[in-house]
Image (cartoon, rainbow, N blue to C red):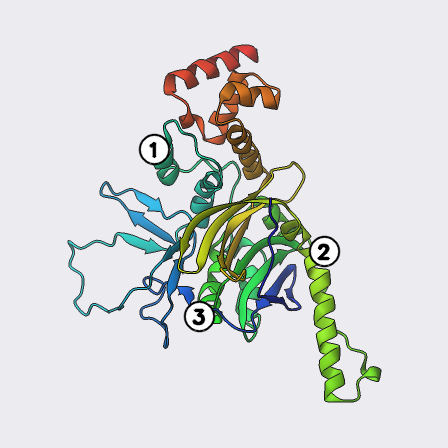
Amino acid sequence: MQHLTFDGLQTRPGQVWGGIRLVPLVRDEPITSLRLHPNGFSEEPARGYEPRCCYSPHGLVAEWTDDGTAVPALGTALCMPAKTVRKSLRPKTKLERRTRVHFVPHQTALEAFIPLTFKRPAIAWKAWSTRAFRVPPPAQERPYAGYHVEGLADALRIFEIHHGQCGVLLYVADALAAAVVTPHPDDYRALHPTLVEDAFGELIWRYANLHGDVPDSRVHLDASSIDTIADLRAAIDAARREWTDFHDGVMAAGLLDADYVFTAEYQMERYTLQRFRPRFEPGRETHVGEAITADDGRLAYLRTFRLSEAQARRGRLLQALAENDWNLEATAATMGIVVPALAARLHTAGYGHLLRDDHLAHHLAANRKGTR
């Protein structure tokens, strides 16, 4: 078990708009050897764009297969930068079709992302992964796009982006909804508007609509103790430290104090891409996500997703299965239920295809008889 840390980042006082609080994360020195991949995210690379490694964020790309099925690219990807990025001056013909699109619905990617952090079953994994990529589990609650979260679109449009800002912590009624960290300020500016395209659970939507304004976090300095520029600088530094201690120890405690299981997915150059999930415990706020860390320990990239209670229940179900090597009898015994009831829960959660069709039908029929 490990904890998340904001190594290499400093927390600045948040900006408030109604019930929305955006807390900036800034770097003294940006990371230039890892950058947002230019292909598809901008028409041409930025000036001086010569990274050693690139990343494509989770949930922002979808591919089309030969049969016309859209497949979301699950998880952040590390890749080498393109040697050249050229524009095609020849217009596309009617026979040419786009096979890639960016900024797919975030909820689609998130629903299929949840199982990826678990130990995979050894049986029928190919069939499961194909279905998981193309047909994610049915949503058990209505997702709300960021456009429908009261005040979020206005806050993103109005708030100042700080000098050196490489990330943000998004709070709704002071409940942490998402965290985004990028290696470079230009990357953050490119991804900043996409927060309104993210999907949030009903809890966050209700917080935004039912709760009033949150208190502003303005810094108040004691003018009587400031006589020189050095005194002013020291007072500002002390206020920043005080805010950081309060924020990291209280406001972001649900994210930073939780124990996470990290899975090293991929390594390229000096960067390691990891997925993480918490121990799914009832009653606790639940965040999953991905992180890219440099070999010196600095956090280069972070994207977290706050799960709804329905999603957390599915996570607990997958956690129990993974801890028992996907053995139904052992998992049911651990949960204190019978196998037909476990099969019914898998079916309701959208994971019924993990079982053979005849076994699933048998268990569902047995569960219906047992509940009469």
The mark closer to the camera, 2 or 1, is 1
- Residue at the image position 21 percent from the left and 53 percent from the top: 97
Q: Residues within 10 Å of mark 2 (few under 14, many from 20)?
A: few
Relative image position of residue 247 (x, y in whole percent) = 69, 60
Amino acid at circle 1: Lys
Amino acid at circle 2: Val
Query: Which residue is under mark 1?
Result: 126
Query: Which residue is under mark 2?
Result: 250
Relative image position of residue 58 (x, y in whole percent) = 43, 52
Q: Horizontally, is 264 left or right of 243 in the view?
A: left
Query: Which residue is under mark 3?
Result: 32
Which label's residue is closer to the chain start, 2 or 3? 3
Amino acid at circle 3: Thr
SS category of the residue bearing label 3: loop
> Please, is residue 7 above or below residue 201 in the view?
below
> Please, is residue 249 above or below residue 221 in the view?
above
SS category of the residue bearing label 1: helix
Q: CA distance from mark 3 to mark 1?
A: 37 Å
